[in-house]
């Protein structure tokens, strides 16, 4: 009995090796390790909060003096004006921007990206502690918090969920579908009809887009989320679904069977999902992520949903996504013509 | 000439496949392609069916180069050894899908269902059918566009005696209706009772080309340890 169990276990492992599932076991820890390397900073750096100060602004001397002397907590950056400060905030060059309060004399307004974030909490706590140490209980130095991204936690996380759905169809469902048609020789059967290769590819892209649109629409209906600028949002969802459906089809063409396609799909899914979704938390990831098509989809979607971004400002991202879709579709066409791994 | 094959080569890993072969097939022939496993029989059929691309050489079917797939696709019907059907759909769905792609009228589906005794199974999912029935659906699909050339890769492999006889009857009927048929086989009775010509491949080379009578009397038949 034991011998049979060992034999069958070895057989299962051999199958996992053959269909490349074993690669996931190696790939995922490596990927997590490198991602954490990019996200994590050293303990000393991590504690420092980057605060933006407007050059022309006249801050209360005590506040300015206190945060300047607290150089183990705060790193201060000077910006030319409020607009530049907000831009820096969006680019994650600073964690918060201090603007002199018009309402309460002697206090400041803290401008942050999101209210419900660890960084905002950290700034408030640090200010509170410094204020207590410097002057005891007085009026709060931070009289108000202004956020650049509107909406609660549900809306804040919506772009990440949308990215997950789009990538799930693109990198998990589409490659498996294509590989299944190859594995069962169904694609070859279809190629024995007067159907053109491009017609099959077009139909596959369209089916992927329908799946993505259905998933996104369901999410909006269930959560009653209003996308705001509907036209810009719809255009990005359509172009994004085209891009990732084409990408997924291409991945399917690189695999002989479904098991390989699933493995390859996960190997593309995670690196596209995590750096884009985690880029909010790391400057290093923000520098790396723009090379990924998922980031070029995620950022505009986030901008449209949370910052009232408009299509006119997002055309480079749109062109990038469309180009990736076209290139991967073209590669799929060439592989199909060659009957690659069929 | 229905098929003209010129210096066709397709080499896989370990030097298996087809080494340059050239041959011609007349209209209305019923050809058995025989040989050991790995001789290149299925490769030859798969190239003719446009499943594989040759490394070199070219094939003309009714004067049309195989590379012009869209022009030649109505000329060839291919029945692979393992039926490649959409298993999770019904028999009728499978035939309808391909009929639409071939732009053949819906009446043709009824005719095929009737001709191949598939009417009682029209609504059954393919995955619940026996191999014999699936093979019949596969043959029916290959005949949707009524192609003049039919290719069968080991058509009776894995079938019981009754179903094998049924396939023989179908092959004879197709041949009698003027179609050209090329099939691969390991079975001596198939070659004896069906074929009008035998082509033997050995390690990718053309070893014999002649009538079944010539083949069974030849030294090649006596020297090679083929079952037939």
Image: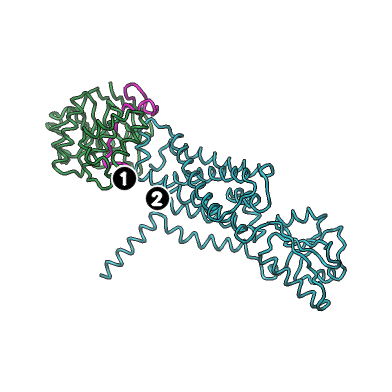
Using the rendered image of the protein, determine whether residue A242 is visible from the camera's viewpoint.
yes
Chain ID for green? B
A183 versus A7 height, above or below: above
Q: Which residue is mark 1?
A: B87
A325 versus A74 height, above or below: above
Q: Which residue is mark 2?
A: A258
Task: Point out the stretch of residues depicted in magenta.
Answer: B60-88
Find residue B57 and report its horizontal and vertical position in percent. 36, 29
Using the rendered image of the protein, determine whether residue A272 is visible from the camera's viewpoint.
no
Q: Nearer the viewer, residue A104 or A207?
A: A104
| Residue B156 appears left or right of B87 | left
Q: What is the chain identity of the residue bearing mark 2? A: A
The hue in which chain A appears in the rendered picture of the protein: cyan
User: Where is the N terminus of chain A found, in terms of image quarters?
Assistant: bottom left
In the image, residue B8 lies in the stretch drawn in magenta: no
| Contact (Cβ within 8 Å) of mark 2 with mark 1 | no
Find residue A129 and report its horizontal and vertical position in percent. 76, 75
| Residue A256 appears left or right of A125 | left
Residue B33, image quadrant:
top left
């Amino acid at each position: 009995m034991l011998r049979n169990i060992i034999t069958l276990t070895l057989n299962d492992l051999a199958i996992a090796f053959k269909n490349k599932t074993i690669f996931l076991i190696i790939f995922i820890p490596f990927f997590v390790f490198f991602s954490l390397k990019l996200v994590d900073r050293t303990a000393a750096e991590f504690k420092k909060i980057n605060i933006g100060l407007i050059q022309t602004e006249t801050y209360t001397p005590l506040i300015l003096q206190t945060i300047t002397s607290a150089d183990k907590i705060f790193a201060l950056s000077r910006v030319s004006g409020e607009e530049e400060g907000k831009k820096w905030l969006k680019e994650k060059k600073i964690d918060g921007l201090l603007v002199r309060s018009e309402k309460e004399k002697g206090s400041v307004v803290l401008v942050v990206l999101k209210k419900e974030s660890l960084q905002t909490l950290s700034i408030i706590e640090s200010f509170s502690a410094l204020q207590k140490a410097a002057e005891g209980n007085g009026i709060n130095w931070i009289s108000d918090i202004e956020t650049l991204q509107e909406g609660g936690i549900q809306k804040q996380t919506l772009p990440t969920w949308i990215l997950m759905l789009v990538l799930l169809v693109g990198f998990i469902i589409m490659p498996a579908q294509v590989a299944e048609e190859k594995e069962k020789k169904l694609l070859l059967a279809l190629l024995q009809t007067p159907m053109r290769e491009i017609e099959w590819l077009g139909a596959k892209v369209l089916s992927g887009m329908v799946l993505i649109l259905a998933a996104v629409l369901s999410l909006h209906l269930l959560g009653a989320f209003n996308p705001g600028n509907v036209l810009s949002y719809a255009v990005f969802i359509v172009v994004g679904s085209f891009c990732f459906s084409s990408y997924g089809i291409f991945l399917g063409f690189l695999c002989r069977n479904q098991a390989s396609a699933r493995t390859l799909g996960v190997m593309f899914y995670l690196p596209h999902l995590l750096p884009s979704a985690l880029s909010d938390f790391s400057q290093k990831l923000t520098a790396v992520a723009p090379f990924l098509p998922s980031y070029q989809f995620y950022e505009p979607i986030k901008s449209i949903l949370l910052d009232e971004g408009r299509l006119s400002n997002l055309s480079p991202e749109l062109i990038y996504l469309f180009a990736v879709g076209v290139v991967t579709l073209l590669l799929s066409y060439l592989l199909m013509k060659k009957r690659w791994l069929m | 000439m229905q098929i003209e094959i010129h210096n066709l080569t397709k080499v896989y890993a370990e030097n298996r496949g087809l080494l340059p072969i050239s041959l011609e097939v007349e209209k209305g022939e019923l050809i058995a392609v025989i040989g050991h496993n790995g001789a290149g029989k299925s490769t030859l059929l798969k190239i003719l069916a446009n499943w594989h691309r040759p490394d070199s050489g070219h094939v003309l079917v009714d004067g049309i180069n195989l590379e012009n797939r869209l022009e030649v696709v109505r000329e060839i019907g291919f029945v692979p050894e393992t039926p490649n059907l959409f298993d999770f759909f019904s028999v009728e769905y499978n035939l309808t899908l391909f009929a639409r792609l071939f732009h053949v009228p819906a009446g043709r589906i009824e005719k095929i269902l009737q001709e191949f005794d598939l009417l009682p199974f029209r609504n059954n999912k393919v995955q619940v059918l026996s191999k014999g029935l699936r093979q019949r659906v596969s043959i029916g699909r290959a005949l949707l566009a009524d192609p003049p050339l039919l290719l069968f890769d080991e058509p009776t492999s894995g079938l019981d005696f009754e179903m094998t006889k049924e396939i023989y009857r179908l092959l004879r009927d197709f041949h009698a209706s003027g179609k050209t048929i090329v099939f691969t086989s390991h079975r001596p009775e198939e070659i004896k009772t069906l074929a009008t010509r035998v082509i033997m491949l050995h390690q990718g080379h053309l070893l014999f080309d002649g009538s079944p009578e010539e083949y069974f009397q030849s030294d090649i038949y006596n020297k090679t340890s083929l079952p037939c």
